[in-house]
Image (spheres, rainbow, N blue to C red):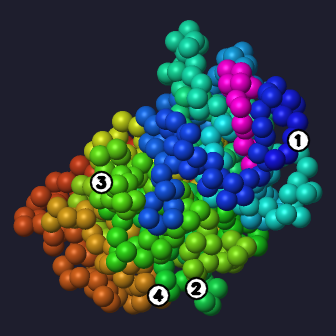
Amino acid sequence: MANLDLSKYGIVADAVIVHNPSYEQLFQAETDPSNQGYEVGKLTNTGAVAVDTGVFTGRSPKDRYIVKDATTEDTIWWDGTINKPVSTEVWNDLKALSLKQLSSAKKLYVVDTYCGTNEDTRMKVRFVMEVAWQAHFVTNMFIRPSQYELEHYGEPDFVVLNSSKTTNPNWKEQGLNSEVFVCFNLTEKLQIIGGTWYGGEMKKGMFAMMNYYLPLRGMASMHCSANVGKDGDVAVFFGLSGTGKTTLSADPKRYLIGDDEHGWDDNGVFNYEGGCYAKVISLSQENEPDIWQAIKRDALLENVTVREDGSVDYADGSKTENTRVSYPIYHINKIVLPSRAGHAKKIIYLSADAFGVLPPVSILDDKQAQYHFLCGYTSKLAGTERGITEPVPSFSPAFGEAFLTLHPTMYAKTLVSKMQEHGAKAYLVNTGWNGTGKRISIKNTRAIIDAIIDGSIENAEKVTLPVLNLTVPKALNNVSEGILDPRDTYADVNDWTEKAKSLAAKYIKNFEQYCDNDDAKALIASGPQL
């Protein structure tokens, strides 16, 4: 317990303040029999606690706003969809709702963290919330300062007020999307959350802020996982939720740097986070042994079905396909601590193509690397966002459009600069489906990644796919025959061609938005062709 003064944030409460709770304190609070509603934590036979995040089992991007003021009007990418502006007046109303809710609480949790491994670029982020498992979530997901660092923590660089129990009754009059709000004020350096219990709003909120501050300083900010080999060779894996970033970077042959968010500065690649947030739908020990073993005491399961005997039914997606677990990064055996390494040599773009068109792997030249990074094609999979119940074709620049706060070309510019400086090579890997109607197996994808990492893919005989304009290896070690060329997975190759033309047209139309300058126009020839 601590006597922390929260009045400087506008919280005036007689609450018990639990400042930087231990995992044991959080466990006792989550499993307290007096808990009700979504505060209830169920102990599973793994030792991990399972919670229900309520109506929201994913982020709610339509309810996300940034205050448009002198700080942000000329820097934020005001696209109107990802970054929606609100006035200072609306912000003040929403903030008052959050403060009223938190001031009425009997107990508040305050967790001080770092976002970013490197001392000269990390943010000190303080989270304030009522719900024990939300405090557990951020303790897992952000970097946990040492006792010495906590004693010298001082004032945070950014504060997050999570008032998930409150909603906004005036949303219609304010022209907002719903009673739910996730709002940022970069002048006050504050994020407020209301109406959604989903912990990912805090995680991705701070990622969006790192995506704002770092590229403005010339550093690459990346929605990627990363790992390193015993010889110091670094690979990064770009991809949206559900494409396999977490699964593929947790490689027993390599050391994990992190599973979702990284920067790349003059010293190399570094993690923003202190934990992992893995999907667990249909999880098995055979296919994903590292994640399976990470689910133990201090891990936090979300929206899974817990049987009466305490076992978890990972196959049950009745609540959501987006069942997840968060755990501190040291639950993975082979990690780098602190979570950073040298410069990347292999850049892997992951796409879960639900339409059976993309090959399992394509070798990209420098211009293709830029083109496909700006496109960021995948299929949005069920459960990762509210309302997504079946795959939808999606183009997401930098493989993370939902978290970009600057114009997409800023992220391409900083990444390409780093790739050229350090001789990195890019590959496009499809972790989705092919003409058989079945998803490409994790076993085959892992073998493909091995061929990229060890360089043997460069020595393979290659073929160029028409329409998509991609270079594909004919055979790779330990990869099933007849799948590397997607045309071979169709009974009638014309079916593939028609689907490929349809996808190519979508690529071409999507890329038009970037062609207001000669640099982007020069990349058109590197993309799909009709």
The residue that mark 2 highlights is 229
Q: Secondary structure at mark 4?
A: loop
Say few, some or many: other residues with alpha carbon within 10 Å of mark 1 (under 14 / 14 to 19 / 20 or more): few
First-in-chain label (1 vs 4): 1
Q: Secondary structure at mark 1?
A: loop
Say few, some or many: other residues with alpha carbon within 10 Å of mark 3 (under 14 / 14 to 19 / 20 or more): some
Check if mark 3's residue and mark 4's residue have beta carbons within 8 Å: no
Say few, some or many: other residues with alpha carbon within 10 Å of mark 2 (under 14 / 14 to 19 / 20 or more): some
Residue 366: say if magenta.
no
The residue that mark 3 highlights is 316
Q: Secondary structure at mark 3?
A: loop
The quarter of the picture where residue 217 lies is bottom right
The residue that mark 4 highlights is 455
Looking at the rendered image, the disc whose residue lies closer to the viewer, 2 or 3, is: 3
Give coordinates of residue 386: x percent, y percent: 41, 37
The residues tagged by marks 4 and 2 sit, at their Cα atoms, a distance apart of: 13 Å
Mark sitting on residue 3:
1
At label 4, which amino acid type do we have? Gly
